[in-house]
Amino acid sequence: MANIAIVGAGQAGLFLGFGLLEDGHEVTLFSDQTPEGILKGRLPSGMGLFEDAVKKEAALGLTFWEDVMTRGEGAILELINPDGSVGLHIAPPVPRPHRGVDQRLKNSRWLQELECRGASVRVVPLASPEELDAHVAGFDLVLIATGKGSLSNLFSRDPQRSPFDKPQRHITGFLVNNFRPEVRSGTIRVLPGLGEVVITPFYSRENRKGRFLLIEGIPGGPLDYLPRKLSGRELLEECQRTVRKLLPGQLEDLQEAELSSEQCWLRGTLTPTVRYPVGRLASGKVVLGLGDAVMLHDPLAAQGGNNATHMADFYRSRIREHAGRPFTAEWMQQTFDDFWHVYGQYAMGVTAGLLMPPAPHQQAVLAAAHHVPAVASALIDGLYDPRALFPWFVDPAFTRESLLSKGVPPALLEQLPV
């Protein structure tokens, strides 16, 4: 068995650590914070997981909140008209599960659990490659599962696989209470030319059922809150006013929402990016990137945490298959390339696709999904498993036949730009 170091106590690093322990490896996890520090910190994201990723967590005995949280069921996509009314409503007839747990609660508990199961946990602020190099000598394999600080400089941007060179949205998020805790579905409201309003069930670090409100604003528009120098509560009030104006008569219960603390909101930008997966330290030691360190997603399509989970699981299987042999740079590159081809490229494709205006053939799919349940199911399934959208949704050569096979009447197709 191998002696493996993981740097980063987020979804990808912790999940991989549990899998490697189960396979009999020696695992050392480096975190820049204690469990208590993680729990008491600011909200890092509104990450949610879909069905397949949740099942993988359950298989490792890591779903600690199933009996107390609001378990999400189904996703709804709505396209909003310029007057604020709903133009298209797309919802599958059979909803699929998803889960949203505050990462502060989850990661702090997981970090404690990982140590209980036999891993060595070292709380060390490894903010630079030089500091990292001093701590990882002697390990058979080192994985970097954080892009914090200058550690991200270990992995240069891959321009062929990165869909954008600048942020496409300015992101604002709130973990709120008193807002429809009984509703289980997640909803994406697309306001063409302005951005998106996303709402999903969320279980907070205070062990309360709440909602995560994500505002994805096109820079310079009314959903762009990045320039506003306000507190979290003031920003939420501003958001409530904006939503009331842009979506009249909708989400009236959002006006009752409130932050539980000033640590329960976030704001910023990121550029969806793919990086080369192999880094090299000054000592010559090679390290392998994992999760956000090498694949960074905009949160709109909710692919970040799911992609990280599937990547960690894929790496685990490749490490198992590689037993007894050295983990070379060539093996690292091939492992990432194989994941990219079987899953990663599709997750990044869905992220990029939601951030761009739909092409004419995709507009046809959206219109058909409004009328035909089978198309709605197939479309929403692409969030849960991005591979399901390829090639019929992205390649117009396949769209028409696919819609016909899903029961779209030929007469309706004649009215659509397919």
Image (cartoon, grey):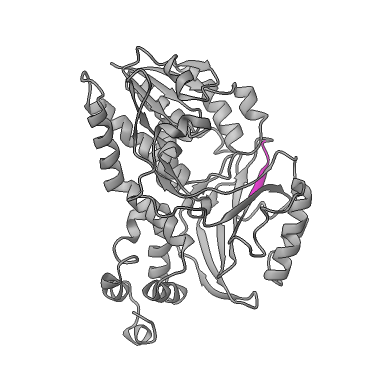
Residue 388: x %, y % from top left: 33, 58
Magenta stretch, residue numbers: 207-212
Q: Residue placed at 45% from the left, 39% from the top?
A: 292
Pick the quarter of the image with the C terminus: bottom left
- Residue furthest to the top in view is 138
Q: Furthest-front residue in view?
A: 282
Q: Is residue 48 left or right of residue 145?
A: right
Disc count in the image? 0
Q: Main secondary structure of the magenta part?
A: strand
Q: Is residue 344 above or below residue 17?
A: below
- Foreground: 242 or 302? 242
Q: Quadrant of residue 281?
A: top left
> Residue at position x 57%, y 40% from top?
101
Image quadrant in which the N terminus is located: top left
Image x and y of residue 107, in percent: 55, 30
The question of residue 209 being in magenta is answered with yes
* Residue in view at x 35 percent, y 12 percent: 138
Q: Is residue 82 left or right of residue 355?
A: right
Up the image or down, 194 lies above or below 295; here it is below
Q: Is residue 151 above or below residue 201?
A: above
Q: Would you say residue 273 is visible in this rendering? A: yes
Q: Position of residue 35 (x, y in %)?
A: 60, 23
Query: Looking at the picture, how far across and down is residue 79, in whole percent?
Result: 54, 71
Q: Residue at x 58, y 45 (%)?
A: 46
